[in-house]
């Protein structure tokens, strides 16, 4: 599944809008922003369905079809209703309340954890504006209501926003950023309110600095969200899905060992406690999974790890006896989800040194931490900054320990879990490999089926195709749910990189044009993400030329060998140069990290034309390889496999270092008739033939009957 | 000619040493540092020789052979002499003088213009230390004398430094940087002296900040250089070579037009005056050339361009009547070289807004400018910072005009000449193409000659080979001098990337190993830089494998097509990936900019594995394409052509932008017997054959007799 829709990606556009600047944010912010891009509608329902599939583990897991999700979405009005104005009016009435007293309120799309997929109760921006797309920022002042979204959503926003809203088309020439706009429309010295849970600390800090140019003050309204206030009783309840233990045979490393690692990092960095706020980091660290949001097996929670204890902040209703036992064994205590603030405050007040990843930990947590620190310092008779200065410059040991940004008692640097999680252990790799083979079997059955349907002139819509694909996957052992909304795009729809077909407006899949299918699944042992582009009839020479160029890029990246310490962006050009040679390109990154039975998008690594992410690719990381080409109003092409970074044994090893390469995880045929054979070099032809040979060897044992025959035909050498 | 000898390049190492840090400096600093790396000995004599070759223009130009240069070098002692201690003693005596009063003095390798090649009178570091290598920094305290150099020079430094010096091997584990060392050995609150002419303003600022950690003060000793004081009467006189007009047929654009462009930039940036300090920028802007330093046709000078006037600060003895007339026509006044300081001071005191490229303009100029500004501000009754704040934040027009770093009345950003100079006009491109063909003819004659010599078992040393090569070049029209010291490395010497053979210690060139020859010339109409690697006997399979891998990288980069706005570093991987596939690599950049009848190394563009240089490659720029492979103690391989960036016409142009590619400037055969044919793809074989066909077509008209026959044989298809 592709990332980075445009040169200015949605999240990046949002960040740039907040930060009042057009240039890419600096590395740490960029790291979070360009890796985890919400693409599909965030209005997918929280998983409260009664349709459940038993997981391979012991917990109960949820399987919701795209159409089920879509039906639930219907309950949130997606077209302007007469009630819309009331929302703005109610919101503005709150501005004047003495305990609020603001001139503007910013409503972003995020939840409190910077999640890609969020629960319905957190979809405040969608509730307020009526806009159901995934990306956008609303700003309401006393006299204005403005909404920013990017090029993917201009038409949808025009349709869905009421007349009370002004649509600002991010990225279009002359369109101000959120900051520029705020600094322009508000009288100097205004008070701009935000819900500090919905902004990372970094984003809030930068917002604060940017609006201070016009003497505006940033007001953190922590006690309630203004949209929730007007949403009132009709606001959906927060998700209460049970959590489950992620079995050790899939996790590979037990919780105690993972906590030990985190504690060694605490020690090395001179800290007492780390606050983990990314939901997938909590799930990975505790070998737990949940179903609070669609597509990601995570649960709303925070985690603090201290040298001798660890505390999970979660709704206790989600924790079964079995999970409780599992946590107890690892010495993890439970507290309520909301208790995170008071606990951080308590730690700060007793002078604990906290590690906070300010690119993901929200501004609410960081601000209670800072005020707690101030109180601690005052108690000790010094101002905070003095203490901070002491700690950071006069203590050489602190310096040598790699402290990057020590201020007061806080260390602001990337969470110790981020990198550890991205480097998969043997059990995780085994799970990823196994789940990919089952996924490949489902896809072989699916492709065999759909070819037959199209041959028989059965009219299938893009949505029906996606639902049938889900059916094939559902039959596989350990299947849980889709890992993202299936992108099923026929013809011109395939050119919409983040296309999300809807039952009432989608196309039928025919045999006159290309069909792009990007989909993935969550299995109990792994996460998949695969794109294939096919033609059910006779592809045109243009289709074949473009497909072959994309394939050459895919092959070049797949075959890359590179020295350790190489950041992913260095390899991006390999996937593009075959397209560049004929003046083509694609406006998204080439590869993203993928979790092991976790988020389909994860950091810190990526392979992108953006140069901000300096994370080196490491042995054990998983990345997607998904070059594409999109011809507006015509067709789209993408070929995506997941790859495991592995060490390669070579005759030489210049510099005495390791050289790395890729091992394929995805084993689904690439449509042979789309290949313009004379364009391929002999070594590229070899690559295709060897790949198809592997596909046959690995996947045929899972198949029988027609699908087996389909596989045989589709893996014949070129 | 290769750049960036090691992961930590010499200049970069020096900068890192100054800045007390190991990580690469930020982009603007990096821009200067990693592009213009002194490689060969800086002890090459100033061009005062009587051996002259008439230039194609009207001025007189100098041709010095490597051996002549080397002889002159001999006059500076290159082995420890009994007098060495005296220098340190004299220097330390100066520390105590009341007008000096310092505890340490830093002696870098630079001149006042950040030049790659410098005149002998500025080789203070070499005079003081006795070390004749190109890179190094000396620091003398009351009790210590320390010298930093990088891996290329450890052995040479051990040999040349007296026992009074401590050698610090930069880049080795645990070796402190200059800053770390100073902060360690000096008692807190010491005074560290520098000659502010020898540090860019940026470098001095960062040094100042770094040593302030230990409360040391940076003392700018502007009125005299302490090494010059002890050098006394035996210090060579500053060069007094005549300058000449660079004819309009080669320059393409007249001085008035270039000055107009600079003035439009001044206007756009809200400035009154720009100070140009890079010698090649002055030469380019004024269509003048000189012979003050070896290898670069430049002359010591500064230039200020105001809206209505321009002033060249140069020793008037260097300016003939003809040159004076040329300058007058363009409205350029003359002042003495030394007058730059008083003029900048005068401008500052009258409130002029100055544009200073603080990455190249030295700290002496910037500091007089700042004190002049302060006086101006005091006169106006405001502090400078207040005025600066006014100008930068309250004046929206200033902001919109792209002002990047406006402080007081100074704008600190890259010189407007840097980019303009790098994008060649038609006349410059024509001159580059023509001079490359004559250079290719000289090389064909040379290779034909040397093959015959080796066949006849004539023993030739590496130095003799270089001298004979010079002889062939000298016969070409418009030849002036070598564009750098010829790297003539047989066998293991070829593995020393910056090898500089000396008559008494160099090897003979035989037929048992590879021979690497990296050389270039200054012609009146262009500058060349070419590397070929050959074997005069039977290459081993290893030689052929490595050579072919390097060739594949060279071909991949040569054939690259890329969208406009692509920085060079994006393409670097194309030149390496064939080597990486077998676990090989090379520790230098792949391409550097080249001036048109100017410096062989110029910015701002580069093609490098370093990611700091974000300059996009643009149509009209020239870059080298020089991947290599070096097997320590065994052999070295490098294949280098110069390339012109050009727009390519393609069937598509995705994004509505231009796509760029390369056109070769260098036309010299690549040795066919070193190619392991089965490793090449059909398209790579085509590339070689087409290149050789072009070589034959373009160069054969310049040849006759044996060299013509040699060319025929060596351009036959594979």
Image (cartoon, coloured by chain):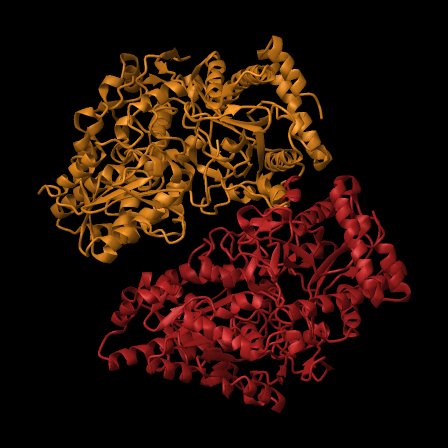
Chain colours: A red, B orange
Say whether residue A165 is left or right of residue A396.
Answer: right
Q: Position of residue B502 (x, y in %)?
A: 41, 25
Residue at x 52% of width, y 37% of height: B633
| Count of numbered circles on the image | 0
| Residue A395 visible in the displayed image | yes
Q: Nearer the viewer, residue A145 or A642?
A: A642
Q: Nearer the viewer, residue B245 or A392?
A: A392
Residue at x 29% of width, y 67% of height: A395
Say whether residue A474 is left or right of residue B43.
Answer: right
Location of residue B12 with respect to A274 vertically, above or below:
above
Q: Nearer the viewer, residue A505 or A382?
A: A382
Where the C terminus of chain B falls, by quadrant?
A: top right
Q: Position of residue B310 (x, y in %)?
A: 27, 27
Residue at x 19% of width, y 57% of height: B188
| Residue B623 visible in the displayed image | no
Location of residue A252 with respect to A541 vertically, above or below:
below
Q: Dividing the picture into quarters, in which one does residue A160 lie?
A: bottom right
Q: Position of residue A238 (x, y in %)?
A: 56, 83
Say whether residue A536 is left or right of residue B338.
Answer: right
Name the residue at the left extreme: B98
Q: Position of residue B374 (x, y in %)?
A: 16, 46
Q: Dividing the picture into quarters, in which one does residue B220 lie?
A: top left
Location of residue B372 with respect to A292 vertically, above or below:
above
């Amino acid at each position: 599944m592709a990332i980075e829709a445009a040169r200015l990606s949605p999240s990046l556009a949002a960040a740039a809008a907040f930060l009042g600047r057009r240039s890419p944010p600096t590395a740490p912010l960029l790291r979070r922003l360009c890796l985890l891009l919400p693409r599909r509608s965030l209005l997918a329902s929280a998983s409260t369905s009664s349709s459940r599939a038993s997981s391979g583990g012991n917990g109960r897991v949820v399987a919701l079809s795209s159409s089920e999700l879509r039906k639930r979405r219907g309950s949130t009005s997606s077209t302007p209703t007469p009630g819309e104005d009331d929302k703005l009016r109610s919101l503005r009435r709150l501005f004047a309340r003495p305990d609020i007293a603001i001139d503007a309120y910013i409503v972003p799309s995020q939840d409190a954890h910077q999640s890609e997929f969020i629960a319905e109760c957190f979809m405040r921006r969608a509730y307020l504006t009526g806009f159901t797309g995934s990306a956008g920022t609303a700003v309401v002042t006393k006299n204005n209501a403005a909404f920013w979204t990017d090029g993917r959503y201009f038409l949808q926003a025009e349709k869905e926003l009421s007349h009370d809203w002004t649509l600002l088309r991010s990225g279009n020439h002359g369109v101000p950023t959120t900051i520029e706009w705020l600094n322009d429309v508000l009288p100097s010295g205004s008070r701009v309110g935000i819900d500090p849970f919905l902004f990372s600390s970094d984003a809030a800090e930068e917002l604060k600095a940017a609006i201070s140019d016009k003497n505006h003050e940033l007001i953190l309204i922590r006690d309630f969200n203004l949209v929730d206030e007007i949403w009132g009783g009709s606001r959906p309840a927060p998700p209460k899905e049970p959590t489950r233990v992620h079995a050790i045979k899939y996790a590979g490393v037990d919780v105690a060992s993972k906590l030990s690692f985190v504690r060694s990092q605490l020690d090395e960095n001179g800290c007492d406690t780390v606050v983990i706020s990314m939901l997938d980091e909590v799930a990975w660290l505790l070998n737990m999974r949940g179903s609070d949001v669609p597509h990601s097996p995570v649960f709303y929670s925070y985690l603090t790890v201290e040298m001798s204890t660890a505390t999970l902040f979660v709704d206790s209703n989600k924790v079964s006896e079995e999970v409780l036992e599992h946590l107890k064994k690892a010495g993890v205590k439970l507290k309520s989800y909301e208790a995170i603030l008071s606990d951080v405050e308590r730690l700060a007040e007793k002078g604990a040194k906290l590690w906070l990843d300010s690119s993901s930990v929200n501004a609410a947590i960081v601000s209670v931490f800072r005020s707690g620190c101030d109180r601690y310092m005052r108690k000790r008779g010094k101002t905070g900054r003095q203490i901070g200065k002491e700690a950071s410059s006069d203590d050489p040991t602190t310096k040598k320990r790699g402290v990057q940004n020590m201020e007061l008692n806080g260390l602001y640097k990337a969470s110790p879990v981020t990198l550890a999680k991205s480097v998969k252990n043997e059990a995780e790799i085994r799970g990823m490999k196994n789940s990919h083979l089952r996924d490949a079997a489902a896809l072989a059955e699916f492709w065999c089926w759909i070819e037959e349907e199209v041959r028989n002139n059965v009219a299938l819509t893009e949505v029906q195709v996606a639902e049938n694909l889900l059916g094939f996957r559902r039959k596989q052992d350990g299947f849980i749910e889709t890992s993202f909304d299936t992108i099923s795009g026929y013809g011109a729809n395939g050119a919409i990189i983040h296309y999300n077909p809807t039952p009432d407006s989608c196309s039928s899949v025919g045999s006159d044009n290309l069909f792009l299918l990007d989909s993935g699944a969550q299995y109990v042992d792994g996460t998949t993400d695969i794109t294939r582009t096919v033609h059910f009839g006779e592809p045109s020479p243009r289709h074949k030329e473009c497909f072959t160029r994309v394939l050459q890029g895919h092959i070049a990246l797949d075959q890359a060998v590179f020295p350790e310490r190489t950041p992913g962006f260095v390899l991006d050009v390999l996937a593009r140069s075959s397209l560049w040679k004929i003046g083509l390109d694609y406006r998204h990154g080439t590869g993203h990290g993928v979790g092991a039975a976790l988020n389909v998008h994860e950091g810190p690594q990526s392979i992108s034309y953006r140069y901000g992410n300096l994370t080196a690719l490491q042995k054990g990381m998983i990345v997607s390889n998904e070059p594409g080409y999109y011809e507006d109003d015509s067709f789209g092409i993408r070929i995506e496999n997941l790859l495991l970074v592995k060490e390669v044994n070579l005759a030489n090893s210049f510099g005495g270092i390791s050289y790395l390469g890729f091992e394929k995880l995805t084993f689904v045929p690439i449509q042979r008739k789309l290949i313009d054979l004379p364009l391929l070099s002999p070594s590229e032809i070899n690559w295709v033939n060897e790949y198809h040979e592997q596909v046959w060897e690995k996947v045929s044992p899972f198949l029988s009957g027609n699908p087996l025959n389909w596989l045989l035909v589709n893996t014949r050498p070129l």
